[in-house]
Image (spheres, rainbow, N blue to C red):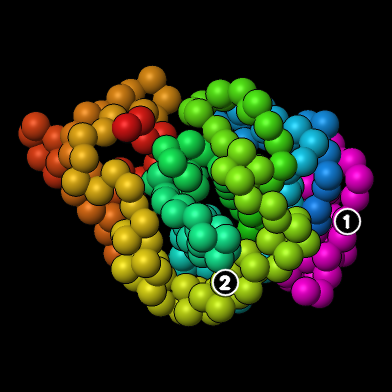
């Protein structure tokens, strides 16, 4: 892989790339063994215990129609990389990765929209590799080590991006539809009753499908609702 920057410690790989987005090329990956101020979705703290694989990638797409689906591409790429270790990885819509019902990877997407870098996206990823005794944050968590898998972090990173770049251009050209069959195959909640929380609002229903746009189609008592953002609670 080209343009990979390694740090022992950063406040946040996301912050580093956002501060240096003008100077760094498309595809730059920043890794840190430890983050002192990692952050997750909705402003949550991203716990970065030693032993995890923490990285962010800087994307400057030539086409910006399908930016929200980049997180789903990354989640699917992580699933495929974990499957290379004979693990059965599944997706918790929109972009968490689980094994045995426990979270093993979280993904954060941030878009930079201004005159300097319109359409630039930074994807931040945390994969639990060798941590043990992980605390429950928003859901139960596990690691590769707890699952009996010994993985080299450099090799795991290379595997994730091998799958990511394979689909990147097709996604930008045609959208989520190019990922949809493989995404749905790994969507654990399909056909099951779930709750979706967005802020203070919670919607109950059956996870009926994932649309060609990557949105969740939830069958409630009243109608079929299209969910664009939220946390799934199974």
Q: Is residue 2 magenta?
A: yes
Q: Percent position (x, y) of residue 62?
A: 60, 76
Residue 112 position (above or below residue 67):
above
Labelled disc at residue 6: 1
Residue 153 showing in the rendered view: yes
For disc 2, the marked residue is 163
The magenta segment is 1-28
Closest to the observer, 216 or 103:
103
Under circle 2, the secondary element is helix
Determine whether, in the image, residue 147 is placed left or right of residue 129: left
Q: Percent position (x, y) of residue 127?
A: 64, 47
Q: Are marks 1 and 2 in contact (CB under 8 Å)?
A: no
Residue at x-position 90% and y-position 50%: 7
Q: Percent position (x, y) of residue 71?
A: 52, 55
Determine whether, in the image, residue 97 is placed left or right of residue 143: left
Q: Is residue 105 magenta?
A: no
Labelled disc at residue 136: none
Q: Residues within 10 Å of mark 2 (few under 14, many from 20)?
A: some
Quarter of the image for the N terminus: give it: bottom right
Residue at x-position 39% and y-position 46%: 93
Q: Percent position (x, y) of residue 33?
A: 83, 44
Quarter of the image for the C terminus: give it: top left
Quadrant in the picture for residue 130: top right
The outermost residue toward the left is 222
Under circle 1, the secondary element is strand
Quadrant in the picture for residue 47: top right
Residue 214 showing in the rendered view: no
- Mark 1–mark 2 Cα distance, whole angstroms, equals 21 Å
Closest to the observer, 207 or 192:
192
Residue 210 position (above or below residue 104):
below
Closest to the observer, 180 or 111:
180
Determine whether, in the image, residue 9 is placed left or right of residue 137: right
């Amino acid at each position: 892989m080209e343009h990979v920057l390694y740090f022992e410690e950063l406040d946040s790989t996301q912050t580093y790339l956002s501060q240096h987005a003008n100077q760094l090329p498309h595809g730059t990956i920043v890794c840190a063994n430890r983050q002192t101020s990692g952050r997750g979705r909705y402003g949550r703290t991203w716990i970065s215990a030693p032993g995890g694989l923490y990285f962010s990638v800087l994307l400057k797409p030539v086409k910006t129609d399908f930016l929200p689906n980049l997180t789903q591409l990354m989640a699917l790429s992580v699933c495929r990389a974990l499957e290379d270790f004979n693990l059965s990885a599944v997706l918790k819509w929109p972009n968490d990765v689980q094994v045995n019902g426990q979270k093993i990877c979280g993904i954060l997407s941030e878009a930079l929209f201004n005159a300097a870098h319109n359409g630039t996206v930074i994807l931040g990823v945390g994969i639990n590799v060798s941590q043990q005794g992980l605390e429950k944050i928003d859901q139960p968590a596990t690691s590769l080590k707890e699952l009996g898998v010994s993985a080299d972090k450099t090799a795991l990173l290379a595997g994730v991006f091998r799958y990511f770049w394979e689909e990147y251009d097709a996604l930008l050209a045609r959208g989520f539809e190019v990922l949809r069959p493989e995404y749905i195959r790994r969507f654990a909640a399909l056909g099951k009753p779930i709750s979706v929380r967005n802020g203070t609002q919670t919607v109950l229903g059956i996870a009926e499908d994932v649309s060609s746009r990557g949105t969740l189609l939830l069958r409630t008592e009243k109608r079929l609702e299209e969910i664009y953002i939220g946390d799934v609670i199974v």
